[in-house]
Amino acid sequence: MGNFPIRILKDVPAGLKHIGRPFIDSELVSTMAPELPVATIILFLEHIAISKCKYPISSMSRSIN
C-alpha cells in the first residue's frame, strides 16, 4: 500500500541458528581505545552521584505528580 521503513516478518525462525564468536574489528577497537578512560571516569562519577542522591527516584516521581 505504501512505502514504509519497516517490514512485517511472516515466518519467525526457531532457535539460534547462526551463533558463534563475535567478530571484533581491530580498527574499531583502536579507534575507541583513547575514549575508554574518559568514558569510564564519567560512568564512575555518575554512579557516585546516583548513590549520593538524597531522595530515591521513585519517591521523587510521586512528589512531582
Image (cartoon, helix red, strand yellow):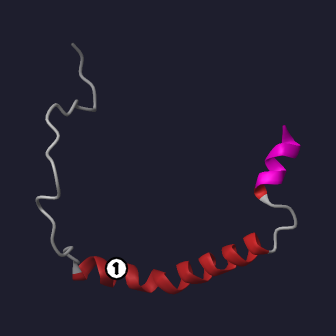
Q: Main secondary structure of the magenta part?
A: helix
Q: Residues within 10 Å of mark 1 (few under 14, many from 20)?
A: few
Q: Is residue 61 magenta?
A: yes
Quarter of the picture holding the N terminus? top left
Kindly identify the residue that appears in the image at 83 percent across and 52 percent down. Answer: 59
Name of the residue lying farthest toward the left: 17
Looking at the rendering, which quadrant does residue 5 occupy? top left
| 46 lies above or below 37 | above
> Residue 11, image x and y in percent?
13, 35
Quarter of the picture holding the C terminus? top right
Give the magenta part as a residue range.
58-65
On screen, residue 55 versus residue 49, left or right, reads right
Question: In the rendered image, which residue does mark 1 sit on?
Answer: 31
Q: Is residue 23 magenta?
A: no
Name of the residue lying farthest toward the top: 1
On screen, residue 16 versus residue 36, left or right, reads left
Name of the residue lying farthest toward the front: 14
Kindly identify the residue that appears in the image at 15 percent across and 48 percent down. Answer: 14
> Residue 10, image x and y in percent?
16, 31
| 12 lies above or below 16 | above
Looking at the rendering, which quadrant does residue 28 occupy? bottom left
Amino acid bearing label 1: Thr
Front residue of 37/54: it is: 54
On screen, residue 64 versus residue 21, left or right, reads right
